[in-house]
Image (spheres, helix red, strand yellow):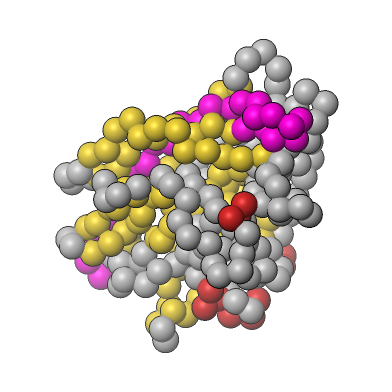
Amino acid sequence: VVGDTVQITAEGKPVVTYQMSPGPVPKGVPESFAHVAHLHPVWSPEGKIVTGNHPPDHRWHRGVWMAWTHTEFQGRTPDFWNMGKDKEGNLTGEVRFMKLLKSWSGETAGFISQHRFIDHTGGAEVPVLDETWEVTVSARSGDHPVNLIDLVSTQTVIGKEALKLPTYHYGGLGVRGNPAWDPADAVRMLTSEGDDRTAGDGKTARWVQIGGDVDGAPASMTILIHPENFRFPQPLRLNPKNPQLCIAPS
């Protein structure tokens, strides 16, 4: 734990940082876009950063995160994805870091933390979901080195009313790639079904890769979807305009 972050390394090289408090937003960007409870930066084994944060086109994109977009709760529609996007710069929904329960190091490293999804649409803070993240990290060397990050999100409704997730084309697990992969022709995407970003958008898959060149060398992330996930193989949103995708079970 370093300050308000959990920083995990392998053989002295950084692998991933977990953000427990809002970092600085870019100059001129409202503070309502500050966000927590996400992974950024994420590094490749060669030391290349593969995630992006606060990009100019979507200030609410935040490395690797978990949130719901189109929801219904108590007759209201909080949005936990587009934090800060309200026309007045207000939050309609928030994912808040609550507590770091545990962290460890060794052959594997990781942490367990708690988040809370909060509805702001009614003029007062209303807790909706409790979420636990369990993140385990390891690294494999050799001819094809990889950094492995295992993320398990467990969400539980607070109270007796359900959070409804109507059909929507994005939400769930979000991933924003390195700014070097913007514009769209600089990023490459591939799914387990052999589809690229155009053919794979809106379809289901067992895994999806996003990557491109960083400082003149290729780097990428592959998101492996667990077979026990709801609605596996899960629907994908492969953004046609920027280096962003999500695993969108709704």
Taking the magenta stretch, the answer to whether it contains residue 122 is yes
Q: Which residue is drawn at 35% across and 56% down?
A: 16
Q: Which residue is drawn at 17% across and 44% down?
A: 106
Our reading of the magenta stretch's main secondary structure is strand
Locate residue 6, reporting x and y percent: 32, 48
Q: Which residue is drawn at 34% across and 49% down?
A: 5
238 sits to left or right of 86: left
* Residue 206 visible in the snapshot: no
* Residue 61 visible in the snapshot: yes
Q: Which of 183 and 234 is in front in this view?
A: 183
Which quarter shows the C terminus? Answer: top right
Residue sticking out furthest to the right: 75
Residue sticking out furthest to the bottom: 216
86 sits to left or right of 212: right
Locate residue 13, reporting x and y percent: 23, 64
In the displayed structure, 185 sits above or below 118; it is: below
The residue segment tinted magenta is 118-144
Locate residue 134, reporting x and y percent: 39, 36
Q: Which of 25 and 45 is in front in this view?
A: 25
**Which picture quadrant has residue 80?**
top right
